[in-house]
Amino acid sequence: MITRNKKKMKSRAFAAVQKTFKLDSSVRRRRSHQNILPSLVVSVILVLIISFLAVSNLKIKQKREETVAKAESLQREMQNLENQSKALQASMSESTEQSFLEKEAREKFQLKKPGEEVVVVLPPEQTPLPQEQEKTNSFWEAILKKLGF
């Protein structure tokens, strides 16, 4: 009888252990599903953050390229303005000279020094060339001329 009781106890103990293992495996499954959800949420948040940073980086890169292009353009413009400034400085120093003033007075205002005579050269009169006269003839006149009428 004792052996029977021992066997019954062993079988009951075995059944209890089996039950706990079954409970453990179902609990493990639930826990694995519960563990997946937070890691999935964290993964989605990380992907969103990385995407945001990538887009921001591209926008900053575009702005940097625009700024560099604008700076180069302004640099070229500044160089052109410096060249113009030098040319104007040179013409200012030249304009204070007496010979420049005399030249400008003669060209712009047709002034002369005492004892000089002003000579004006007129361009030759333009007479229409014979070819131009033929071009002015009408279309029908050209046809009649070719036909011999």
Image (cartoon, rainbow, N blue to C red):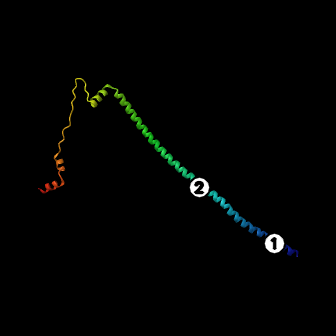
Amino acid tagged 1: Arg
State whether residue 58 is above or below residue 8.
above
2 or 1: tag closer to the N-terminus:
1
Labels 2 and 1 touching (C-beta < 8 A): no
View extreme (top): residue: 114
Residue at (81, 70) in percent of width and height: 13
Rendered-image quadrant of the C terminus = bottom left
Give residue 48's mark.
2
Amino acid tagged 2: Leu
**In the visual, does 69 lie left or right of 2?**
left
Q: Residues within 10 Å of mark 1 (few under 14, many from 20)?
A: few
Residue at (66, 61) in percent of width and height: 37
Rendered-image quadrant of the N terminus = bottom right
Toward which corner of the image does residue 80 lie, by quadrant? top left
Toward which corner of the image does residue 92 lie, by quadrant? top left
View extreme (right): residue: 1
Of the pair 1 and 139, the residue shown nearer to us: 139
**In the visual, does 36 lie left or right of 16?**
left
State whether residue 86 is above or below residue 62.
above
The residue labelled by disc 1 is 12
Rendered location of residue 51, percent (x, y): 57, 54
